[in-house]
Each structure stands twice: as structure tokens, then as C-alpha cells.
Amino acid sequence: MQRIFRYALFCVFSLVSVSTPMAMALAKNDTPPDPATEPASAEPAATEPAAKSKSASQSRMDRTLPTDPSAPPKTERQLAEERKKREAARKQGDITFDDLKFDIEKDGTFLPEMITPDIKELSKRTLKLRGFILPTSVFQQSGIKQFVLVRDNQECCFGPGAALYDCVIVEMAPGKTATFATRVVTVKGKFEIDPDSFQYPDGGHFAVFKMTAEEVK
């Protein structure tokens, strides 16, 4: 069953490469905003300020500058408070797609050493991650056992030009299923780094992370 699902994902990836030419254009842009870091209101999403002296984990947390040019940038104190909150949430097992980022060029070759120590610490842990169910990765509305969780509700997070850290392959635990939704969902389950299972027949990766989910809501 897993082989069939992986083959289906490969077909989905191929379909996305044909049906969404805008994905290549999006490859030139920054990573889409993380749904877990976006407030429920219409408050603008955030991006990363320049801070070369900060650690990789701090840099991830600093991607909080508003995209609205009329909105004032956040102060260092506000950024520090947000980093503190994110670190606390991370320790409790509540992560975002920003926590999964690592340095890799869009459509670049993945190497295991690209995975940061912070990401490795998450492996094998039961975590919660918010995102969107990729519509083209499911073939039914309910009773879903496997799907792709993506950062954004557009297909730019899975396909040409997409970053590997913007998607997670989700397999439901035995006896558990999910129901499709167009809104943001929260997936709870065991997170794993799996660079071997999700590769193209001719090489290259379409995913490196997976979760065995206990619940999706």
C-alpha cells in the first residue's frame, strides 16, 4: 500500500509540474507564510529580517516582518519575545513549518547533512504540525489513510520549485483515518526524517519528512 501511495505521489508531482507553471515563478520568491504562524485575523504574514550573527534557530523565528509595506517592522524586543514563545511551544511538541527549514536551493540536490541539529532533535517525537491537506494527494473525502501536508494551500509547496521542507508525507496510524478539509488542519503524530522513501526512480527527492498521525483535526 505504501508503494502504491508513493507511486501516486510521484504521479501527482508530475501532474503538478505540467498543470502549474506558476510554480516555477514562485521558486524565485520566498517560502510562503507558515499557517501555524499566521494569526486568525487578517494581520499580515511575516518574513525574515537580515541578521547574520544569529543562530539558525533564531533566524527561523525572525521571519516575522510584516509583508504589508505600510505596517511598521517589529522591534528586536518583539522578535525576541516571539522567539521565546516559539521555543517554548517547540519544547511542548507544537511545531511549525518554519521549524523544518534547512538550507537548500529550490530544486537543489538534497544531502542528509543539510538537516540541522534542531530538526534532528524533533525526529521520533510526537508533535503537532499545522498545514493544509494537498487536494491532489487524496482520492476521497473521508476515510483518508495517507496524504501530503503542505505549508500553503497552493500547489507551490509540492512540485517544481517547491522546497522539500514545505511538505510532510502523512500516513495515518493503524485504525485511524482523516477527513479532507480546505481549511488549516492540525496533525498530531510521530515525526520522522526519512530521506530514503520518497525519491524519484531516476534520483532526487520529492519529500524527506513524514508523520505517522494519530489524529487530524
Image (cartoon, grey):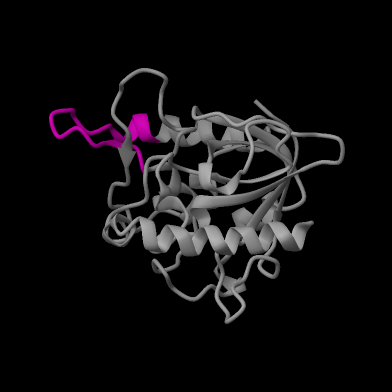
Q: Is residue 69 magenta?
A: yes
- Position of residue 154 measured from the top left corner of the image (x, y, whole percent): 40, 43
The residue located at (36%, 17%) in the rendering is: 41
Q: Quadrant of residue 5?
A: bottom right
Q: Residue at x 52, y 41 (%)?
A: 135
Residue 176 in the image: state x and y as whole percent: 81, 34
Task: Specify whether residue 215 is in view.
Answer: yes
Main SS, magenta residues: loop
Image location (x, y in percent) of residue 109: 49, 76
Residue that sits furthest to the left in the current view = 70
User: What residue appears at the point 32 percent right and 33 percent down from the top-left corner?
Assistant: 45
Residue 35 is left or right of residue 141, and the answer is left
* Part of the protein shown in magenta: 63-79
Residue sitting at the far right: 175
Decide which of 122, 20 is in the foreground and name it. 20
Assess whether residue 118 is covered by the magenta stretch: no
The percent coordinates of residue 28 (x first, y second) are 27, 61
- Lateral position of residue 27 relative to residue 119, left or right: left
Residue at the outermost front position = 140
Instruction: Say which residue appears at 35% left-offset and 31% top-offset.
Output: 77
Task: Look at the image and tell me in which quarter the N terminus lies.
Answer: bottom right
| Of residues 36 and 137, the one drawn nearer to the viewer in this rendering | 137
169 vs 135: above or below: below
Question: In which quarter of the view is residue 212 placed?
Answer: top right
Q: Residue 134: tell me if it is visible.
A: no
Picture quarter with the C terminus: top right
In the displayed structure, 202 sits above or below 12; it is: below
